[in-house]
Image (cartoon, grey):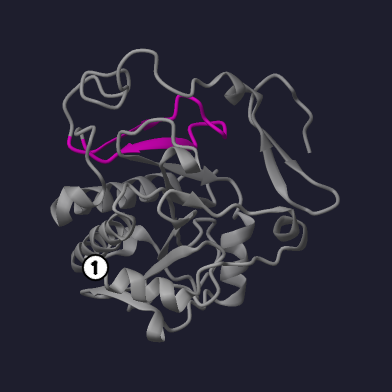
């Protein structure tokens, strides 16, 4: 454990819980909103030239050594992921895979996490469609626990929401959030770079489908968090690793946030007000 307080990201481990936390004092001065214009629009601070999709190092990284990247989905400020259509989504999937391969090939990188926070309710400070990538020098606890259990995703059954060629999306059996989805390939694909072209098309199609359903369900731009779990890049043997996407929304009704409270955080047991079977039915019927 280190103890620096100079603002550089400082990885610490709690002696009581074992939890790992980056202390990042420099992010206290990160602006919540840009001072002038959108930095992600063409001609802006982070996108001086025209682009279709784009990546660049995060100006306010949570980890050192170029391990935090920003992913711009489109030059169109008012777009949503699903409004880009399958062709636009496929460009994003390809960029995710390219950056995963590039970062995963580094000797100091063990795990690559692709993710998105959409909406102020989940901490997004810029509306322009974008995501991020964190490249860890260890395998984080949550994906590690999944891998150690064998990455068993279960069967969707009546909680199936949508399908695309080679892919299925369903509501988990015991979700923590009111509306949650798992997207997984039918085949045992370990990571994004391993996706063949047809599987990339299927993932793009399914992402467009389910993210549109979320917005239409509440007739609003629904806040959500999205992350992708995949095989670690630590050189280990992970035969059970299975690529999958998880999407969760904090809304339990339109504009009504479901807050995680002390009884849940203190116990690790969660209380979901929306039965997953009802959530799946609502999403199936929404298009």
Residue 185 in view of the camera: no
Residue displayed at 43% across by 31% down = 125
Q: Is residue 91 visible?
A: yes
Please name the residue shown 52% across and 70% down the image: 238
List the residue tagged with mark 1.
199
| Residue 84, image x, y percentages | 18, 48
Local SS, label 1: helix
Give how far across and how far down residue 232 sits, in percent. Answer: 51, 59
- Which quarter of the figure has residue 149? bottom right
Magenta region, residue range = 52-74
Q: Name the residue at 47% across, 74% down.
A: 276
Locate residue 201, reporting x and y percent: 19, 63
Q: Is residue 71 left or right of residue 176?
A: left
Which residue occupies the foreground of this view, 93 or 119?
A: 119
Q: Is residue 221 magenta?
A: no
Asked if residue 56 is positioned above or below residue 230 in the image, the reply reads above
**Is residue 72 magenta-colored?**
yes
Quadrant in the picture for residue 204: bottom left
User: Depth check: 203 or 36 in front?
Assistant: 36
Please rate how many residues cluster around mark 1, counting C-alpha atoms within 10 Å: few if below 14, some from 14 to 19, many from 20: many
- Is 2 displayed left or right of 154 in the figure? right
């Amino acid at each position: 454990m280190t103890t620096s307080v100079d603002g550089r990201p400082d990885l610490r481990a709690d002696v009581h819980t074992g939890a790992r936390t980056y202390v990042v004092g420099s992010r206290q001065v990160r602006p919540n909103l840009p001072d002038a214009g959108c930095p992600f629009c063409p001609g802006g601070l982070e996108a001086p030239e025209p682009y279709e999709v784009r990546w660049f190092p995060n100006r306010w990284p949570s980890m050192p050594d170029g391990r935090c990247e920003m992913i711009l989905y489109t030059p169109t400020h008012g777009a949503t992921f699903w409004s880009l259509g399958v062709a636009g989504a496929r460009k994003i999937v390809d960029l995710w895979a390219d950056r995963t391969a590039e970062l995963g090939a580094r000797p100091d990188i063990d795990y690559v996490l692709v993710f998105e926070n959409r909406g102020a309710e989940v901490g997004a400070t810029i509306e322009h469609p974008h995501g991020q990538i964190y490249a860890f020098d260890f395998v984080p606890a949550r994906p590690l626990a999944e891998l150690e259990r064998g990455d068993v995703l279960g069967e969707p059954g009546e909680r199936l929401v949508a399908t695309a060629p080679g892919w299925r999306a369903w509501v988990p059996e015991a979700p923590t959030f009111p509306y949650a989805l798992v997207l997984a390939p039918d085949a045992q694909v370990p990571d994004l770079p391993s996706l063949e072209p047809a599987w990339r098309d299927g993932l793009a199609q399914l992402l467009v489908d389910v993210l549109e359903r979320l917005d239409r369900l509440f007739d609003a731009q629904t806040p959500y968090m999205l992350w992708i779990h995949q095989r670690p890049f630590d050189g280990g043997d992970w035969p059970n690793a299975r690529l999958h996407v998880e999407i969760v929304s904090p809304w339990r009704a339109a504009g009504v946030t479901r807050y995680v409270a002390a009884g849940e955080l203190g116990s690790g047991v969660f209380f979901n007000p929306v039965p997953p079977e009802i959530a799946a039915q609502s999403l199936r019927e929404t298009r």
